[in-house]
Image: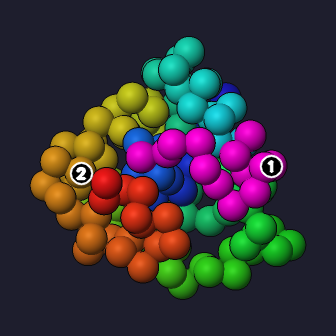
Amino acid sequence: MKTLLRPHHGLCIQFYEGKGYNEEFTKKMDALINQIQRNPRMVIQLHTAVDELCNSCPNNIDSECISYEKVKRFDEKVLSYCDLNSGQVLSMQEFLQLVKDMIIEKDLQPSICSDCEWYSICIK
């Protein structure tokens, strides 16, 4: 079974430190991190719409993100920098490594998500 994942969440996962929009979101993120640690080869499908994590986000209203344009831009930049496509299927391990190599190691996060409310966590 494939887990749907927004591409920009490949950054969020790598900088996550136990904080989130609310308790429900934090529990969902904790569960995903635990799942990744248990099975780094889990299969994901990159998806530029509401995903597993979004289901617990307060910005998700009736299965639509109220910050859609902003997060769509985040997703598109992650896909572009990693030379990936929406709908692409790969392992979580492979995806996170690509994000690390192609974005984090090159310090490209500011060009992707500097206007994210959680950005200060990612630049520590």
In the image, is residue 18 part of the stretch drawn in magenta?
Answer: yes
SS for callout 2: helix
In-front residue for pair 25/72: 25
Q: Residue at x 39, y 29 (%)?
A: 93
Residue 79 drawn above or below residue 46 = below
Judge left or right: residue 17 versus residue 58: left
Q: Quadrant of residue 35?
A: top right
Residue 79 visible, this angle: no
Q: Position of residue 85 (x, y in %)?
A: 39, 58
Q: CA gap, disc 2 to disc 1? A: 27 Å
> Badge 2 is on which residue?
104
Residue 119 drawn above or below residue 92 = below
Is the C-beta separation of discs 2 and 1 under 8 Å? Answer: no
Looking at the rendered image, the quarter that the N terminus falls into is top right
> Badge 1 is on which residue?
24
Q: Position of residue 43 (x, y in %)?
A: 53, 30
Residue 71 visible, this angle: yes
Identify the magenta region.
15-27
Question: Which amino acid, by three-letter code, is at mark 1?
Answer: Glu
Q: Position of residue 54 (x, y in %)?
A: 69, 58
The numbered disc on residue 115 is none
The structure's colour scheme is rainbow
In-front residue for pair 104/3: 104
Q: Residue at x 46, y 21 (%)?
A: 41
